[in-house]
């Protein structure tokens, strides 16, 4: 069983430590501690800590666009400390529920590196659909990488099993 809680400035070290992990270097664009501190206090962003039963952080998520006039919220980032144990899928279901039921979003979207097949599979398994490809849009090292845009709409959420069974 996992739960979400709002992140605070004491969580920045945990967030940075997760981003610094070598296995995530090609999956995310890393931010500095200063960037996270600034973003943590932005009204348009929401930092969530994913915790286990013992209230120990096992991951985090960042949402952007909370003030969007178009009611479109972005999953800017989600990182799970121990991938492969099902925590990511469970956390995504809780975040999706929050986005549509608490924040009344019309559209919840994300971008994911094209070669991140594991994440794309997890996103699809909780209802996200691939919309398109931003070709060679991010420079990673000495090569360009493409991003896949994915989303789920509120009517898809409310008609889905995710809505009826968020865990």
Image: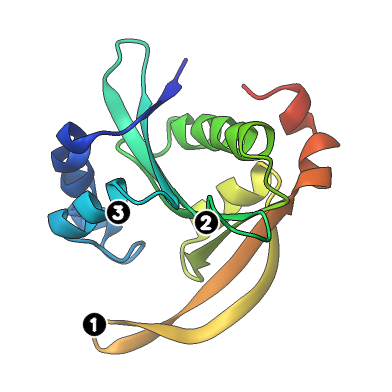
State how far apart marks 3 and 2 are (Cα): 12 Å
Viewer-side residue, 149 vs 153: 153
Residue 17 position, x and y percent, is: 16, 45
Residue at horizontal 59%, vertical 58%?
68
Left or right of 108? Residue 136 is: left
Q: Which mark is residue 65?
A: 2
Identify whether 77 is placed above or below 59.
Answer: below
Identify whether 30 is placed above or below 163.
Answer: below
Q: Which residue is mark 3?
A: 39
Q: Which residue is mark 1?
A: 141
Left or right of 84? Residue 13 is: left
Graded by Cα atoms within 10 Å as few (under 14), some (14 to 19) or many (20 or more), the crowding at tag 2 reads some
Residue at horizontal 46%, vertical 87%?
136
Q: Earlier in the sequence, mark 3 or mark 2?
A: 3
Viewer-side residue, 14 vs 84: 14
Residue at horizontal 64%, vertical 60%?
69
């Amino acid at each position: 069983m996992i739960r979400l809680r709002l992140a605070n400035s004491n969580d920045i070290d945990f967030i940075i430590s997760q981003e610094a992990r070598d296995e995530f270097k090609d999956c995310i664009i890393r931010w500095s501690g200063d960037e996270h501190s600034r973003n943590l206090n932005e009204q348009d962003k929401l930092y969530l800590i994913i915790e286990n039963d013992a209230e120990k952080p096992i991951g985090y998520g960042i949402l952007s666009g909370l003030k969007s006039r178009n009611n479109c919220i972005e999953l800017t980032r989600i990182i799970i400390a121990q991938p492969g144990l099902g925590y990511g899928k469970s956390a995504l279901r809780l975040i999706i529920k929050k986005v549509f039921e608490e924040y009344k979003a019309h559209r919840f979207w994300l971008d994911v590196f094209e070669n991140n097949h594991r994440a794309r599979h997890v996103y699809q398994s909780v209802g996200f659909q691939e919309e398109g490809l931003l070709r060679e849009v991010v420079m990673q090292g000495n090569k360009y990488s493409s991003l896949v845009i994915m989303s789920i709409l509120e009517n898809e959420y409310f008609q889905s099993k995710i809505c009826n069974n968020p865990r």
